[in-house]
Image (tube, rainbow, N blue to C red):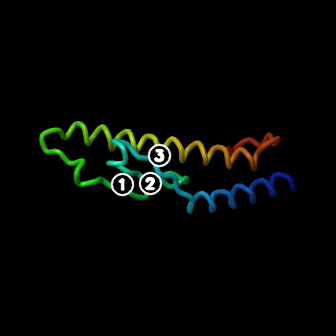
Amino acid sequence: MKQAARAQQQLQEIQAQLATRTVEASSGGGAVKVVARCEGPLASIKINPQAINPADPQLLEDMILSAVNQALAEARKISSEEMSKATQGLSLPGLM
């Protein structure tokens, strides 16, 4: 039980750290930049005004989608790695 309580405390500490940690991804040579929090949600999206071409909205949409997917994937990867450190070697159903 002590081991389970210790793991639970570690998980809470990691979650608090992940809440403040961010990752950034870009696409279109930096025309679109996305910042995601490692706890899940997006923090910001920046679009270079030169990337806005009314004649080709599909290009901008693709750049945004690419940057968002990259940022979220990196955030999930970091979150998963950090959480697995706390539960490494434990077999506690319901924690993960």
Q: Earlier in the sequence, mark 2 or mark 3?
A: 2
Left or right for 82, reference 3? left
Q: Secondary structure at mark 3?
A: helix
Residue at the limit of the structure toward the right, as seen here: 2
**Residues tagged 1 and 2 counted as in contact (Cβ below 8 A):** yes
Numbered circle sitting on residue 71 = 3
Task: Find residue 19 and report its horizontal and vertical position in percent.
Answer: 56, 60
Q: Position of residue 96 (x, y in %)?
A: 67, 43
- How many residues crowd around disc 1 within 10 Å: few (fewer than 14), some, or many (20 or more)? some
Locate residue 31, reporting x and y percent: 32, 48
The residue singled out by tag 2 in the image is 35
Q: Secondary structure at mark 1?
A: strand
Task: Identify the element where label 2 is drawn.
Answer: strand
Q: Amino acid at mark 3?
A: Ala
Q: Which mark is residue 45?
A: 1
Q: Residue at x 55, y 53 (%)?
A: 38
Contact between labelled residues 3 and 2, with CB atoms less than 8 Å apart: yes
Question: Badge 2: few (under 14), some or many (20 or more) residues near its Cα, within 10 Å?
Answer: many
Determine the residue positioned at 34% across, 56% down: 46
